[in-house]
Amino acid sequence: MVVGELDPEDPEDVAAPLTVSGKPKPDKSAIREDVDEIVNDPLHLARRSPKRRRSSRSQYDSSVHEGSEKLIRERSIKSNRRDKFIQCIIHDDVDMAQLRKLAWNGVPSDLRAVAWPLLLGYLPLPASSRAPTLVRKRQEYLSLVELAFARNREGLDQQIWHQIEIDVPRTRPGVKLWMHGSTQRSLERILYVWAIRHPASGYVQGINDLVTPFFQVFLSAYIDSDPEEFDPSLLPENVLNAIEADSFWCLSRLLDGIQDNYIATQPGIHRSVKRMAELVARIDPPLSAHLESENVEFMQFAFRWMNCLLMREISVENTIRMWDTYLAEGPDAFSQFHLYVCSAFLVKWSKKLREMDFQGIIMFLQSLPTQGWGDHEIELLLSEAFVHYSTWHNAQSHFGK
């Protein structure tokens, strides 16, 4: 079965086949020649040579003196880390403790599409089971889509579908990847199938953001260009279907651990925001006191930080690096460790915030200056969060019951 390309304007096209017929075919040179091998064998990602994307970064590298000691050292460290990942991943039975230890400090970009599913438990640890599992799970997802859209638009839950139709075009505004029809149709299917499989929560705004890191990581495995600039409709149908299915199952795994955030009244988020306020009061008493004196309630800004896992505050690229560490921390990281990341994130701006009044604080926190952030800033944030986590996580008395 070919997963349908939905046309929101045409109810008869809700589950129509994917097609790019009638559209001009842009340059396909960014698609890797070994896509079929990658689809069929996840270990192919570990065996192949690391790819070099055609980007401004390569131009920058060429301008740096090749004999630079610092450059040689950095490349050597990256190469050694990548080798350790490969040795771990290609093992007949992956050592999860070792993989988590390696992933905490970041996963090489060309290995994420195999490392993340292992860390999430979507891919089994024994190497011999991985390819058959992917075939089965991808087919299962296609069957779920076929069943969900069997009666076209009339057969859909109209309330859920209406909200998804509103939110999908708003996902990552201005980023070309998420403006393409093929990407939006994939996102619609992922969200709708997840929602009807989880009636206790259904679809909640914010879940659409959580799909984007997975989709970009899996898309990156098949192309040699920036995924945010790529049109997925150029990919072979089986490849796009695999990206969509893998994104769905990984999203499902992630949400299994934070479903309290999305059920009626969203108790998980309210609990996390309350705990965050209590934690910040201990980490940075002057900031906490200032926010209280200005009548700033944590729910006014931290609700979004919990609901969207900070994805509205930082780029998808930053989020992907952050999720390397979250996945390494284990299944509770997206609720437990994230609380400490949010606290460290707020405290980072403490000096500025303590000089602002209510309006200034709210406006600043709604548009934080993180546009230029890269891995370095994310890693500093994660390190600060880990210090707080180590200090406070087992001191349960600092959280109200």
Image (tube, rainbow, N blue to C red):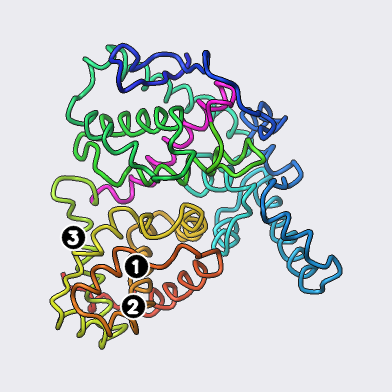
Measured Cα–Cα span from mark 2 to mark 3: 19 Å
- Quadrant of res 374: bottom right
Camera-side mark, 1 or 2: 1
Residue 287 percent across, percent down from the top left: 26, 83
| Image marks 1 and 2: residues in contact by CB distance under 8 Å | no
Camera-side mark, 2 or 3: 3
The disc, 3 or 1, on the residue closer to the chain's N-terminal end is 3
Q: Residues within 10 Å of mark 3 (few under 14, many from 20)?
A: some
**Circle 2: element type:** helix
**Image point (39%, 59%), residue name:** 333
Residue 124 percent across, percent down from the top left: 54, 40
The disc, 1 or 2, on the residue closer to the chain's N-terminal end is 1
- In the visual, does 366 lie left or right of 111? left
Tag shown at residue 270: 3
| Image marks 2 and 3: residues in contact by CB distance under 8 Å | no
**Circle 1: element type:** helix
**Image point (23%, 59%), residue name:** 303
Considering the image in quadrants, where does the C terminus appear? bottom left
Please, is residue 13 above or below residue 291 in the view? above
The residue carrying mark 1 is: 342
Tag shown at residue 392: 2
Please, is residue 112 above or below residue 164 in the view? below
Name the amino acid type tagged 3.
His
For this rendering, which residue is in front, 4 or 391? 4
Q: Residues within 10 Å of mark 2 (few under 14, many from 20)?
A: some
Please, is residue 90 above or below residue 365 in the view? above
Name the amino acid type tagged 2.
Trp
For this rendering, which residue is in front, 237 or 234? 234
Residue 394 percent across, percent down from the top left: 33, 75
What span is colored magenta in the figure?
Answer: 232-260
Residue positioned most to the right: 67
